[in-house]
Amino acid sequence: MQKEWLSFRLTLLLYSIVFIIPLTFYFVYTSFDAAEDDTKVIRQIGWVEGVSESMSIAPIHQFDQQMVKKIDDTLQKISIWVIYNNDSKFYRGKQTLEKDFLNVITCWTEHKKKLSQNDNPMVIDEHSAKCSHLVTNLTTIIENMVYLKQNKLINTFYWNLAIAMFLSWLMIYMVRSYIHMQMKKHAIYDHETKLFNKKYFLAELRTTCAGSVRYKYPLSMLSVSMDGFEEGSEKYDEKTKTYILKTTGGLITFLTRISDTACRYDENHFFILLPDTDEENALILERRVREALEKHDVIAGFEVKFKFSTTQFNNEETPEAFVARTQDFLN
């Protein structure tokens, strides 16, 4: 149950990461969409500034309906951006963005009126210069706001890219861990000794015991215990333990038949299931295994102590009782 809950949590985390990554890029996409609007307003206010400067240098004393309409339309488009960004934290003016824009609109409205009424050219020139100054001030404010916004956008983009890369790496790591966990969950071999693991051994034990009862053939089991390999033991370091276990597993594999089932039962116990073998013949294998392990150069060099026990299956006992009885003989 615990392993299934772990798998569920890991799967949920993977789905969460897969869901977050598109959200991250969607945020970046919407940010660039806003940047496009900022670029448009820069062009629009820049055009208005250019017209206002031209009017201040060489004022248009005649009422040009087409030019006036184009300026009105452009200011109308800019007003939408101003309303949307009025409360922006990037504003660096002296009042508010809306008031700065209102000053431009007020000045331009008065200027149109003077142009339409054909007022004194000197008055128009003076008023034109005033409007040009207000437009230039608004242009500077908007350009600074857009620069600060885009600078933050760039930083946000890189941060989101870094987060997306990290989440992608985390997702790959989690997938690998999940696959490794599933492989380990369904594996039948012990990683260190290359012998069968406990899960496979118990399944094979039940099948073999049932066959022994049904077909009346003898069944024996050899148990090997290693001293100093209990969980928490510090007699050997991990590297030495791994080396000894690998050597032990190789020797057991070499000495057993294809029909035998040799496994690492726990940290320091090995079982060898011997189908169609009575106790007398099983003791012969025990002697061979004992001599091979105790006289091996590598294992003997570390002075590893072994205990052995051999038992024959009783058709009236359960597989679990068979294992327990074999272990009891080690004590």
Image (cartoon, rainbow, N blue to C red):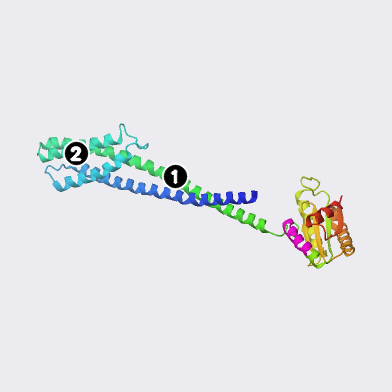
Identified at 18% across, 42% down, the residue is 55
Q: Nearer the viewer, residue 212 or 240?
A: 212
**Residue reaching furthest to the top:** 94
Above or below: residue 257 compared with residue 127: below
| Magenta span of residues | 197-210
Label 1 vs 2, first from the N-terminus: 2
Helix, strand or loop status at disc 2: helix
Identified at 14% across, 46% down, the residue is 65
Q: Which mark is residue 156?
A: 1
Q: Position of residue 296 (x, y in %)?
A: 86, 59
Helix, strand or loop status at disc 1: helix
Dominant SS of magenta comes to helix
Q: Is residue 42 left or right of residue 25?
A: left
Task: Sort mark 2 into few (<14), some (14-19) or many (20+) by Cα contacts within 10 Å.
Answer: many
| Residue 305 in sight here | no
Identified at 25% across, 39% down, the residue is 135
Rounded to the nearest angstrom, the CA distance separating label 1 from label 2 is 38 Å
Count the numbered circles shown. 2
Q: Is residue 166 left or right of residue 76?
A: right
Above or below: residue 18 compared with residue 58: below
Label 2 sits on what residue type? Trp
Identified at 61% across, 53% down, the residue is 177
Residue at image mark 2: 108
Label 1 sits on what residue type? Thr
> Is label 1 in contact with label 2 (beta carbons under 8 Å)?
no
Q: Position of residue 310 (x, y in %)?
A: 86, 58
Q: Position of residue 265 (x, y in %)?
A: 77, 55
Q: Which mark is residue 264?
A: none
| Residue 278 in sight here | yes
Q: Is residue 273 left or right of residue 38?
A: right
